[in-house]
Structures are given as structure tokens and as C-alpha cells.
Amino acid sequence: MLAGSTRLHARDRHDHRHTQINLNTHSSGGINWSGAAYIREQRMQLHLIRHGQTNWNEERRIQGQSDSVLTELGIRQARALGDRLRAIDYAAHYSSSSVRTRQTTEHAFPSATGVRFLDELREIYLGPWEGSLYADIAESDPESYKHFWEQPHLFAVQGAESFHDLQQRAVAAVAAIAAEHAGERVALVSHGALIKSYLCHVEGRPLDRFWEPPTMNNCCHSIVEITSDGNAKIVQYADEPVGLAQ
């Protein structure tokens, strides 16, 4: 697969914006779409997929934008996801430029060509925490650790990205992709916090409730419909159907 990569500095901020786009729909792992019969005029459909399990997931080591690799389980998860999505005709495939998302894309969509790997889709940048065990950070920086998991709107570690900046980056990246793919179905492989930050934006969920369920398990699959007037609605959240857009 050919890689087209766009450079982004992790702490860069992007303007929050809405883009008017179109959407089609199709089948997914959670909702039983009936092939091309379920097509909604003037809508775009975005399939958001978290990467498979990595060695650092298994070790409970902080990843952020540092590179880890899929475990054997992670590879099986990606392949199983690909099997569930095989009947779906995607107009384009996007992936974070991280190794773990590249691997997930390759195993889930082995026939995809022209996949675009973007730095903008990378995970939250955690600077000095990256590579450390969660347990060690909980001991060495308990206040920031508590903010990260219990009060993410207050999380502010020097050299790391805030959840607010992460969300702005995610929203801007999705808006740019949507603007390029009006009326099309797109697959996007990224990371748990980045995907959840975008879904929180769609829901209007404040960042202090960021980690509330649904949980973003490895290779979970979410779907967002966005109408031509810019309104977005989640129809599948982490493999669980939410309800069809009206």
C-alpha cells in the first residue's frame, strides 16, 4: 500500500470547524445494513476503527505517539474486523501514521490501495509519559494521573497535548477528510482517545465526562453519519448500535 503522510506537530492547534458533506451507508459489524440498499442522499458515512492490541497495551505501558507493534491477538483482531467489513465498499481508507495503525490497516484491509497515512490521526501526544508504565506514573505523578483518568479537562502535563487540543485536532482532521469525500463511505483507522474525542464532539459530551462508556476496546468500530448541512449523528459506537439517523 502506498503511504501519503502529512506532518503535524503534536501540540499544534486547529480551528474548530464544521464542513457540509454527504453520506452513504452500508453494512457493519454492529448494524445489519443490507448492502447498497441502505443509501441516504446527501450524507457521508465515516467508519472509525481503533487499532488492534499492541505489546504496550499488554504491558500497560503508555503509548501516546510513540510506536508499539501489534501482538498476535492484535493481528487476529484486525483480520477478524476485516472479515466483518469485507462486503463494505469504501471509497477511501485513512490511517494514523503510527506503526500500530498501519499494521491494523494492512491486516484489516489487505486489498486496499492508496491508503493515506496522516500524522493528524495519531494518538494524544503524552510527551514525558510515553514509554512509562501506567503504574509508575500513578506513583510518580499521582495528581496528573488522576486528572488524566478522572478529570481529563484538567490534564496539563508540560510537553504533552491536552484533551482540548486533541479534540480540536481530531475534529479538524475529520472535517478535512469529509470535505474531500462528499457522498462517500470512508474507513479511518486511528486510536482510542482520538476517536473518542471526536465522538464526544459529535455527542456534545463535555471533556470532564470523556472516559464514560462506551469503552473503546481494541479494533472497536464506530460509525458517524454527517448530513450535507453539517449535522453529525453517531449510529454505531464501539460496536454497539445507537440507532439509525432519521
Image (tube, helix red, strand yellow):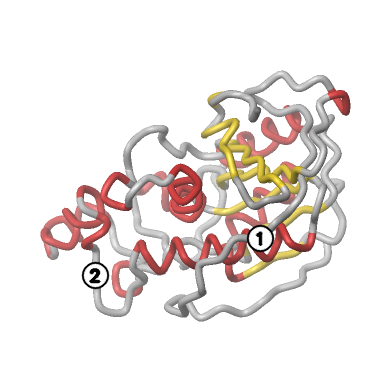
| Above or below: residue 219 compared with residue 230 | above
- Determine whether, in the image, residue 219 is placed left or right of residue 197: right
Q: Nearer the viewer, residue 213 or 53?
A: 213
User: Is 227 placed left or right of 38 in the picture?
Assistant: left
Considering the numbered disc 1 on the image, is that residue within a helix, a strand or a loop?
loop
Q: Nearer the viewer, mark 1 or mark 2?
A: 1
Question: For numbered disc 2, what is the local secondary structure?
Answer: loop
Q: Considering depth in this image, is 214 or 242 the residue closer to the camera?
A: 242
Q: Which quarter of the rendered picture does the N terminus lie within?
A: bottom right
| Residue 207 horizontal/vertical position (percent) | 32, 52
The residue depicted at 35 percent of the width and 74 percent of the height is 127
Instruction: Give the residue number, with chain letter if any, for mark 1.
Output: 19
Cα separation, mark 1 vs mark 2, equals 30 Å
Instruction: Give, as a three-letter code, the residue at label 2.
Output: Ala
- Please state, as top left, top right, bottom left or bottom right, where the C terminus lies in the image: top right
- Residue drawn at (42%, 53%) of the image: 56
Drawn side of residue 212 relative to residue 203, left or right: left
User: Mark 2 and mark 1 in contact (Cβ < 8 Å)?
Assistant: no
